[in-house]
Amino acid sequence: MASATNLLVFRDTAEQLCGRSLLLRLLQKLREVDPSRPASVLSPLILAGQLECTLADSDSPSTGTAAAISDALAAAFLGTASVGLGALGSQLSSIEGSLPGLARVSYPEGFAYYALHPVDFAEAAAQCVHAPSVGLIGIRSIGTTLSAVAAARLIGKGVFASRITVRPAGHPYDRKTEFTNSQTSWLEQLKRKDSVFLIVDEGPGLSGSSFLSVAEALERHGVSPSRITLVGTRDTDPAQLCTRDAVRRWGRYKRQKAVSTIARGHLGDIHLSGGEWRNVCLQPGVEWPACWPEMEALKFLYPDRQYLFKFQGFGEHGERAFNRAQALFEAGWTPRPIPTSEGMGCYPFVSGSPLSSSDLSAELLDRIAEYCAFRASSFPARIQDDQLMEMVRFNLLQELKLEVDLPAGCFDSPTPIIADCRMAPHEWIRSKDGRIIKLDAACDGEGHFLPGPTDILWDMAGAIIEWKMDAEAEAYLVRQSGKRGMAVFEPKLASFLLAYSVFRLSYCKMALSSTQKLSERARLQSAVSYYECVVKTALHRLPFSQRPLTT
C-alpha cells in the first residue's frame, strides 16, 4: 500500500435538498430542451442522474423508473433516440410521491470540476466491448449518468446492454460492495447470456478501492476476472494506490481509460493545464508559483493568443460560473466571457504584466479592497459550508500536533458569499492600457476545494498572506475595506488568517505527496516551508489558546 498524506483539503459539496425541489429542477430543465439540439439534453441528463442516485441511495421502489428516465435522456443526448418530453413528464409525476423529504444530493464532481464529458464514457465503452451482451455497473454518484450513457451507446451499436448502480461502503482506502437480492438476480441473468462486465466511474482516486470492491464482488458471484473491465478517467500506477495489496489486485482486471472529448477538441491549441500556463503567461526569469498539476482545471489558449478557454463545468454549475463571469465583466474587473458549449469558459486573452508582491502599493490595496467589497455584495451564497472548523482542527493536529480552542462560530458569516479563492499577485495583471485586471475569478469559490461558501474575510486573508503584506499594509487594507462597508474585526480576521494558512499548507502537502510531476516538487516544498511559517505567525495572533498534543 502506498503511503498518503491524510489532510482535509477537499470539501463535501453535497446539499441537503427537498426531494421534490430536485424533481422540479429537472422538470424546468426539460422544458428548456430543444429537440433539434441533442446537446441541450445534457443539463437534464445530469439532473436525472442525481435524481436516480438519490432514489437508489434511499432504496426507493421508484429507482427503476428514475433509471429509465436517465436511460431515455442518455439516448436522446447521444442522438440515438428522440426525447419524449411528455412521456418523461408522466414518469416523473409517477415517482413524486416516493421522493424523500430531505435528501443529500451531490453534484457530480467530474462534470463540475474535471472536464469529464459523458461522451467520454460512451466512446470508452464502445472501444472495449466486443461481446454481444454487457452488464454495466455504475459507481454512484456520477456512475448513474456514466453508466446510462455508456449503455445507450452500446445499445445503439446493437449490443444487449443492461445496467445497475452501487454505492461501495466502508473506509475510503478499503471499500466493500455487496449486491442486493435484485442485483444478484440481474447478475445471474447476465451470466447466463455469457456477458462481459464494465465497471464505470470517475477515477480511480487515491486508493482505487471502490473499483476493486465492485470487481471483487463480481468475482465472489462467479464472474471471471477476464470478463471484468474497469473504465475510468485516469491511467493508474497500482504501486501508488493507497489500498492493501494494490498491485496484485489491480492487475487482475482489464482497464480502459475514457479519453477526454474536450481535450481532443483543442488538439491544435496551446495547452495551459498542469501548470503550463506559467510558461506562457509569466515573464522570463519570474519565480513560478507552485501548483498541483493534476488538480488544475483544463485550460487552452488559441495559437494566435487571442482567446483563452478554461473548463467551468456542465449544467447548473457551469451556468452559475458564467453568470458570475458576466457580472465581473460588467463591473470592470475581468475580460468579457464568451458563451460556449462543452462546459468551457472563453475569454479574450489579456496582454500585460502579471503582478508580484513587489508591486504592492496604496493603489493596489485600494483595488483589492474595492474588489472584496464588490464580491461581498454581488455573489451571496444560499448557505454557508461549515467545514472550516473541522479542517483547521484536524490538519493542525496532523501537521503540528497542536490542539486549538476555536470558539464556536468563529468562521460563521451573517452574509456568506462565493469567494474568489485566488488572490495571489499573479492572479492580477496590469494591462497595456494601465488597468488592473482580476483573472480567473468565476469558478473556484464553488470548486472542489475548501472553503466553499464563506465570509469575504477568506479572500481578505488570502490577499494578506499571498501578497506578503506587512502590518502597515494590512492595516491600510482593513481601513479601506471599512470605508467600503466591510467592518473587519481583528479576532475574526485572525481566525480566517489561520484557516487560510492551514488550508494552503495542507493543500501543498497533499500536492507534494501525490503529484507525479517531479519538477513541481521543489516548488511545492518551498511553498510548504512558507505556509508553515505563516501558520505559526497566525497562531500567535489568535485571541484564544493552543496547546501541544500530549501523548
Image: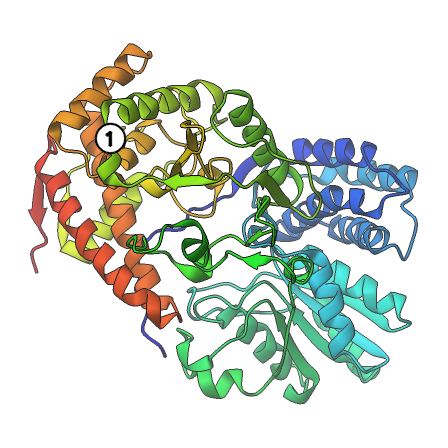
- Depth check, front residue: 199 or 111: 111
Residue 185 in view:
no
Residue drawn at point x = 27 percent, y = 25 percent: 365
**In the visual, does 149 lie left or right of 404?**
right
Residue drawn at point x = 79 percent, y = 65 percent: 151
**Residue 417's spot in the image, x, y percent?**
43, 27
SS at mark 1 in the image: loop
Q: What sort of colour scheme is used for the picture? A: rainbow
- Depth check, front residue: 533 or 66: 533
Residue drawn at point x = 84 percent, y = 42 percent: 91
- Depth check, front residue: 363 or 518: 363
Q: Which residue, given by chain and number where applicable, does mark 1 sit on?
A: 408
**Residue 31's spot in the image, x, y percent?**
82, 32
**Residue 62's spot in the image, x, y percent?**
75, 48
Residue type highlighted by circle 1:
Ala
Which image quadrant: the C terminus?
bottom left
Quarter of image, res 482: top left
**Residue 314's spot in the image, x, y percent?**
65, 45
Dot 1: within a 10 Å radius of its alpha carbon, few (fewer than 14), some, or many (20 or more) residues?
A: few
Vertical relation: 538 (above or below) 225: above
Residue 376 in view:
yes
